[in-house]
């Protein structure tokens, strides 16, 4: 699994051992693919998605009155997310996981 550089939670391909039906032990063999979070994320990624969401709690873990918000409506929240994003990029550059040239190519493509 990989640790997301922004949220810090681990996602990715999860491997496990298959438990044999009716037996108190597991069979060691080929890994079981349970999920591939990042592949799903990439396939569903929407560049036009909004910055955030504002909701009103309506009790027992449910919410109502959902509405999308822009960075201008939540400047402190935007600044916090931006700082973590920049820190993640810097960290990946320092570790050699991201190449400056790669980043420059991406920035050139931005209109």
Image (spheres, grey):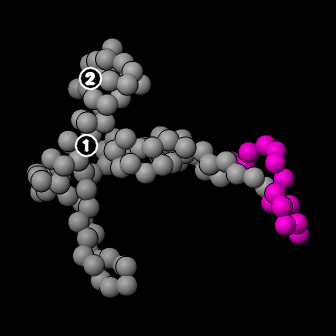
Residue 23 magenta-highlighted: yes
Q: Is mark 1 on a helix, strand or loop?
A: helix
Q: Can residue 40 be seen in this view?
A: no
Q: Position of residue 34 (x, y in %)?
A: 65, 52
Q: Which residue lies furthest to the top in this view?
A: 101
Q: Position of residue 94 (x, y in %)?
A: 32, 24
**Most foreground residue, 91 or 75:** 91
Image quarter for residue 65?
A: bottom left
Q: Can residue 5 be seen in this view?
A: yes
Span colored in magenta: 19-33
Q: Residue at x 24, y 76 (%)?
A: 56
33 left or right of 24?
Answer: left
> What label sits on residue 54 in the rendered view?
none
Q: Residue at x 26, y 61 (%)?
A: 53
**Most foreground residue, 74 or 14:** 14
Quarter of the picture containing the C terminus is top left
Q: Which residue lies furthest to the right in this view?
A: 22
**Marks 1 and 2, how far apart at CA:** 19 Å
Q: Where is residue 66 in the image (x, y as percent from the top left)?
A: 28, 69
34 left or right of 79?
Answer: right
Residue beneath label 2, please?
Answer: 107
Residue beneath label 1, please?
Answer: 84
Residue 38 magenta-highlighted: no
In the image, residue 102 above or below residue 52: above
């Amino acid at each position: 699994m990989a640790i997301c550089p922004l949220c810090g939670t681990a996602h990715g391909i999860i491997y496990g051992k298959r438990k044999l039906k009716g037996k108190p032990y597991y069979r060691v063999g080929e890994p079981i693919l349970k999920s591939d979070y990042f592949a799903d994320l990439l396939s569903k990624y929407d560049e036009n998605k909004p910055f955030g969401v504002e909701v009103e709690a309506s009790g027992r873990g449910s919410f109502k009155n959902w509405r999308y918000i822009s960075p201008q409506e939540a400047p402190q929240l935007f600044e916090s997310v931006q700082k973590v994003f920049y820190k993640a990029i810097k960290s990946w550059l320092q570790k050699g996981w991201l190449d400056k040239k790669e980043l420059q190519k991406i920035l050139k493509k931005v209109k």
